[in-house]
Amino acid sequence: MTTGDGTGLLARGIEVADARGRRIVGPLDLRAPAGRVVAVVGESGGGKTSAVLAALDALAPGLRRVGGTTLWNGRPVPYGRAARRWRRSTVGWLGQDPVGDLHPLRTVAALVAEGCPGLRGGERDRAVARVLEDLGLEPGLRHRRPHELSGGQAQRVALARAAVGAPPLLVLDEPTSGLDPATVELVAALLERRRADPGAAALVVSHDRSFVERVADDVVEVGPRRTARRPAPAAPARRPGRRAVLAARGLTLDVPGGRVLLDGADLEVGEGEFVAVLGPSGSGKSTLLRALAGLHPPRSGTVEVNGREAPPRVRERDRALLRAVQFVGQDPAGALNPAHRAATALARTARLLRGMPPAEAAAAAARLLEDVGLPAEAARRRPGRLSGGQRQRVAIARALAADPDVVLADEITSALDAATARGVLDLLDGLRAAHGTALVVATHDRAVAARADRVLAVDPERRALVPQRWPRPAAASAAGRPDRARHGTAADLS
């Protein structure tokens, strides 16, 4: 890795431990020289985010830095309150939970303006408008609040807030999760513009290897932690004429302000079928899944589960319907009760929706956590002590604890590294084979779409679900990739 001229961030020997003294990550060295983009990569749950937060003295409660030092432009980064002042003046931060980080009552313009407190009046307004345009957010969104945005739009608003003030150090944690390819291009362009600024450095935490290859000057690998998984059963045979477990008839969906996303759409999902739903950010993919789950009442139309009409609101659905349809959203941090340990969340679902006795429910929870590739100690952790990818896997396991007939999953692999994503999809294929569990996934991931029985796209102009022919992706070619990034390890920093 390039040594640079002493400017930027330099962290050496970073080690992080939990409250019991168990090492989470490290020792690890990180260097983000001015004028460069540095990526921190590794498996989900391997400690990427914890290492970066430790270097910035911003670890969550329950974790502590037990080793290492951090320098910024050759000077030690302070601790405690002084570190918070340093971060406010120096660091632009995008976390793994961008929706949860946005104040629900503030408009998009006000939220982005939080990132440039030193600007006033017209200068601030121009900076906000410029960064929103750079990230493909139309001017009409300026007056919306977070609940009126799609997941991808909210992620871009949070990114705009982090970048608007041109901070000397920009830290992005999984900046492309849940974004469509066109929006990923905008994020890459933003990082390219920063590279032209000789005084600006950027750290990108990501499991998206193709994105990292494109944008990073240097790559630091955080050591993998592999968890053995039981082999999944074979994928189900493609059976024509299978029984419909979920159907939507004449579904019309709108958002606050009256904008129609889907107009009279029909959808039928058969037993054991895998349907992928594609479309640009903000087109209505997430809204469709939420409507099927009873979380977004449609303007018109009906939803049927196993031939029975389901009430449009989830609170009106009985236990049989709640068990049959399980939803995994883009924001597992917001969906998981912060007071419940992972095993408790799963066991509670099994008890309430399947009537399992406590001991049987606890055993089922332990098996499911293992199935989604989580280490045994994760069962005792609360959401705040889990990585973004681990929270996503807990949310998936909690849905499976209900033994559902259909799983509705919004960007199910967005926070997972490639190996973990394959393991989770293999698990779901096994459930489709063994139990006929159907799967409807909103995704931007071509590899996920390639595994589906059917692919539908939300067409924003026609406001319709349009069938797609989706070939399996060809193996990625190294030809044409930028030769800028070089993979390295902590040892390369010495």
Image (spheres, rainbow, N blue to C red):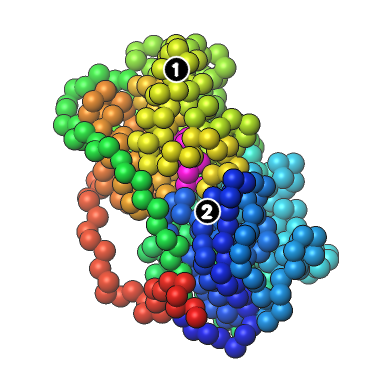
Residue at horizontal 35%, vertical 36%? 371
Pointer 1 residue: 359
Dominant secondary structure of the residues highlighted in magenta in the image: helix
Indicate the secondary structure of the residue bearing disc 1: helix
Query: Total of numbered circles in the picture?
Result: 2
Which label's residue is closer to the chain start, 1 or 2? 2
Neighbour class for label 1 at 10 Å: few (<14), some, many (≥20)? few
Horizontal arrangement in the rendering, residue 79 relative to residue 63 (left or right) = right
Q: Amino acid at mark 1?
A: Ala
Horizontal arrangement in the rendering, residue 467 relative to residue 6 (left or right) = left
- Residues rendered magenta in the picture: 388-396
- Would you say residue 315 sits in the magenta stretch? no
Pointer 2 residue: 24
Residue at horizontal 40%, vertical 23%? 363
Indicate the secondary structure of the residue bearing disc 2: strand
Percent position of residue 122, x then y: 80, 67
Question: Residue 390's mark?
Answer: none
